[in-house]
Amino acid sequence: MNCYEVRKYYNRYRKHEKNDLDFVSTNRVPISNDVGYIEISITKDLGQEIATDAVLTIYVNQNGDQIPVATLSPTENPTLIELPIAHPLGTLVEGPEYYFTPYNLTIEDEGYYRIITQNIRLFPNVKAAFFYNLNRIVTGQPGHEEIIIIPPHPRDIIK
């Protein structure tokens, strides 16, 4: 997918004011058409077992809604996932060198607390490694989730 296709999808799902559309079309900062990688290792019971029955879902944010773009059950550790830097369904963020899309992910497994990671930024041809351990649900402590929020860089501008 090239930058023109990404821009076409992005513009179709977004309402623009005239100035905003001119900004995207003049492309002072290009929309990245590169890919990045998430390398993820998921274990349970303090690393004693690979969580092969866990469900990993990756989302992008579109107008405040979480849109799933990938769902899988990892069969080995680590699992490598390739994603576009600027996803056509996601909200674009203007970085200093190119537009990109931040990703969110959830890991769920029956009998274990859910894990949520928000605002994952991918870089062109770079692998971001994440290590997770699923913790068993403790009786009397329902609804305990592990939530990790990666802060955005101060110079990034959400479009």
Image: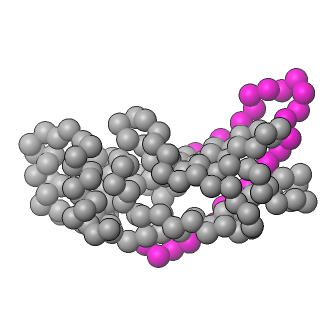
Rendered view: 56 above or below 39: above
Residue 29, horizontal then vertical, whole percent: 23, 64
Q: Is residue 49 left or right of residue 28?
A: right
Residue numbers of the magenta segment: 124-152
- The reply, left or right, for residue 2 in relation to residue 77 is left
In this view, the residue in front, 124 or 150, is 124
Rendered residue at 20%/38% (across/down): 15
In which quadrant of the rendered image does the N terminus lie?
bottom left
For the question of whether residue 83 can be seen, the reply is: yes
Examine the structure image and report whether residue 142 is included in the region drawn in magenta.
yes
Q: Quadrant of residue 132?
A: bottom right
On the question of residue 131 being in view, the answer is no
Query: Closer to the camera, 135 or 6?
Result: 6
Relative height, residue 115 to residue 83 (above, below): above
The residue located at (62%, 45%) in the rendering is 106
What is the x, y in percent for residue 153? 44, 54
Identity of the residue drawn at 70% across and 60% down: 74
Residue under the point 26% across and 66% down: 3
Judged left or right of residue 48, residue 19 is: left
Q: Is residue 99 magenta?
A: no
Whole-percent x and y of residue 67?
Answer: 45, 42
Q: Count the numbered circles shown.
A: 0
Colouring mode (rainbow / by chain / secondary structure / one colour): one colour
Q: For the view shown, which residue lies furthest in the bottom direction?
A: 125
Instruction: Give the percent coordinates (x, y) of residue 62.
Output: 38, 41
